[in-house]
Amino acid sequence: DAKTTQPPSMDCAEGRAANLPCNHSTISGNEYVYWYRQIHSQGPQYIIHGLKNNETNEMASLIITEDRKSSTLILPHATLRDTAVYYCIGAGSGNTGKLIFGQGTTLQVKP
Amino acid sequence: EPEVTQTPSHQVTQMGQEVILRCVPISNHLYFYWYRQILGQKVEFLVSFYNNEISEKSEIFDDQFSVERPDGSNFTLKIRSTKLEDSAMYFCASNWAGTGNEKLFFGSGTQLSVL
């Protein structure tokens, strides 16, 4: 699985967009970029994933660079409940649902 | 949205005792997983399970661990003789196809404390 690099922590003001970066320069062509988050030691929660194209759902947007070496997760209007550890994970080489979690980015949304 | 449920939410046991952690995956899912997270550390993959067989396991998943789907709804993780270092949050997860293009649904976890 691809190794990803994320900043250890970020702050964001409530109501503003939170932009979380991830570098995944070793990702292979058939690996998806996944984002999960973990709120206070609860089970990880799926946010979004993509392969090449940008993706958007009700939770977030995912912007993947054309060379696929990096991506940005965007929470358009962060709330206090978005305070969590956000994980960027490369997965999908072969038919497997196994995920390799890194340390993630701790996002603190402040009032 | 459907949920993966785990019981108990907290389990305290004495070192050397056997524990069974229980999970009810989402009903139409076919692939099942256990992960664990030691306090302050990363979430770690333990094992994946499909068609009543282990399909992949990590180095952590040694002979002390076993998994079973005893009926059509439950998925269990057994630790035969617990050690202090088994203290962790254990997460069950499931999905339908087990491929890379499919999200995992995680349960809320069982906090295991080995004394």
Image (tube, coloured by chain):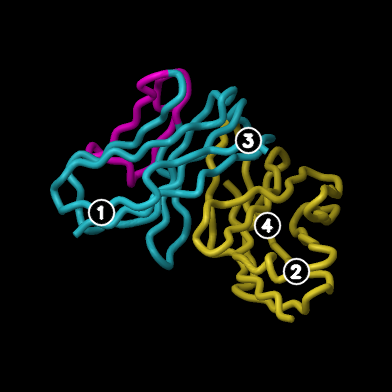
Q: Mark 4 and mark 3: span between their CA atoms?
A: 31 Å
Q: Is residue B56 magenta?
A: yes
Mark 2: which amino acid? Thr
- Residue, disc 2: A79
Is tag 1's residue or tag 3's residue first in the polypeptide sequence?
3
Mark 3: which amino acid? Pro
Q: Which chain is cyan?
A: B
Foreground mark, 4 or 3, reads 3
Span shown in magenta: B49-71
Mark 4: which amino acid? His
Q: Mark 1 and mark 2: span between their CA atoms?
A: 35 Å
Foreground mark, 1 or 4, reads 1
Q: Which mark is residue B12?
A: 1
Q: Chain letter for mark 4, please.
A: A
Q: Chain letter for mark 1, please.
A: B
Sort mark 1 into few (<14), some (14-19) or many (20+) by Cα contacts within 10 Å.
few
Q: Is residue A104 above or below residue B100?
A: below
Q: Which chain is yellow?
A: A
Q: What secondary structure is found at the residue carrying circle 4?
A: loop
Residue A18, quarter of picture: bottom right
